[in-house]
Image (cartoon, rainbow, N blue to C red):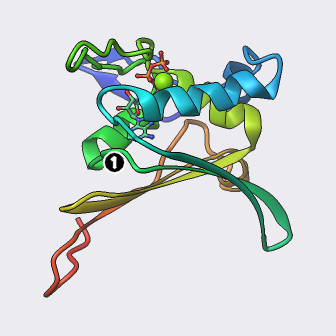
């Protein structure tokens, strides 16, 4: 196990197997879908529309969930793909549904083994991946989450 310590005190870590474990709280898939809808509706995102679709990518069935909300930046994507970080607050009297910082992980991993998140807002585009297949293939001992983000400038698109 990779030794990760904070001033000599061991950090608690998460095995990749936990991604499946955590998803079993959804006994049926519709509560998993509800987690994704709740996230789009919450005041930090405030989406007006939400689309659910099914496509096939390279022979694999793929569900897509799209909202037209505020999107996110690199730091928020990191929190989205981590566990237990939620800092939602009420906006204009709309109380957030999300409080635990877990719904996206439990929901998405109940619906599939792999999730890719694409976000585009005015200034920044961001892509993040939470993939059990990838973690198994590389023999990961911990959950790693590749994230890339771009600044949306007309002249040059800087990878951050
Ligand atoms: N559709 C989305 N657009 C932008 N940001 C999102 C979206 N979905 C999730 N996020 C971000 O990812 C974070 C984690 O989502 P997650 O559902 O795991 O936790 P939560 O909604 O904060 O709490 P809960 O576990 O109670 O649902 C959210 O707090 C939010 O910042
Ligand atoms: Mg949520």
| Marker count (numbered) | 1
Name which quarter of the figure residue 159 lies in: bottom left
The quarter of the image holding the C terminus is bottom left
Q: Is residue 50 left or right of residue 7?
A: right
Instruction: Tell me the residue at 28%/19% (across/down).
Output: 87
Instruction: Tell me the residue at 41%/12% (across/down).
Output: 99
Instruction: Tell me the residue at 39%/26% (across/down).
Output: 42
Q: Is residue 98 above or below residue 17?
A: above
Taking the image as drawn, is residue 114 in sight?
A: yes
Question: Which residue in the protein does label 1 denote?
Answer: 71
Q: Is residue 126 left or right of residue 83?
A: left
Q: Is mark 1 within 8 Å of ligand 1?
A: yes
Q: Nearer the viewer, residue 96 or 49?
A: 49
Image coordinates for residue 41, horizontal then vertical, percent? 44, 30
Name which quarter of the figure residue 104 lies in: top right
Q: Nearer the viewer, residue 10 or 134?
A: 134
Q: Under tag 1, what secondary structure?
A: loop
Q: Is residue 120 left or right of residue 153?
A: right
Image coordinates for residue 143, horizontal then vertical, percent? 54, 38
Q: Farthest residue toward the bottom?
A: 155
Q: Nearer the viewer, residue 57 or 143?
A: 57
Disc 1 packing (10 Å; few <14; some 14–19; many ≥20): many
Name which quarter of the figure residue 24 lies in: top right
Q: Farthest residue toward the right?
A: 59
Image coordinates for residue 22, horizontal then vertical, percent? 67, 20
Taking the image as drawn, is residue 104 in sight?
A: no
The quarter of the image holding the N terminus is top right
Image coordinates for residue 125, horizontal then vertical, percent? 31, 62
């Amino acid at each position: 196990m990779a030794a990760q310590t904070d001033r000599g005190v061991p950090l608690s870590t998460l095995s990749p197997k936990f991604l499946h474990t955590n998803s079993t709280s959804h006994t049926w898939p519709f509560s998993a879908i509800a987690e994704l809808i709740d996230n789009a509706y919450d005041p930090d995102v405030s989406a007006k529309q939400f689309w659910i679709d099914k496509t096939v990518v390279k022979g694999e069935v793929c569900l897509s969930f799209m909202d037209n909300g505020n999107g996110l930046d690199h730091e928020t994507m990191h929190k989205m793909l981590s566990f237990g970080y939620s800092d939602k607050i009420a906006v204009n009297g709309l109380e957030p549904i999300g409080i635990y910082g877990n719904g996206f992980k439990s929901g998405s991993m109940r619906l599939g083994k792999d999730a890719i998140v694409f976000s585009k807002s005015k200034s920044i585009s961001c892509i993040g991946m939470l993939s059990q297949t990838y973690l198994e293939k590389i023999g990961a001992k911990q959950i790693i989450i590749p994230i890339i983000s771009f600044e949306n400038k007309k002249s040059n698109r800087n990878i951050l």
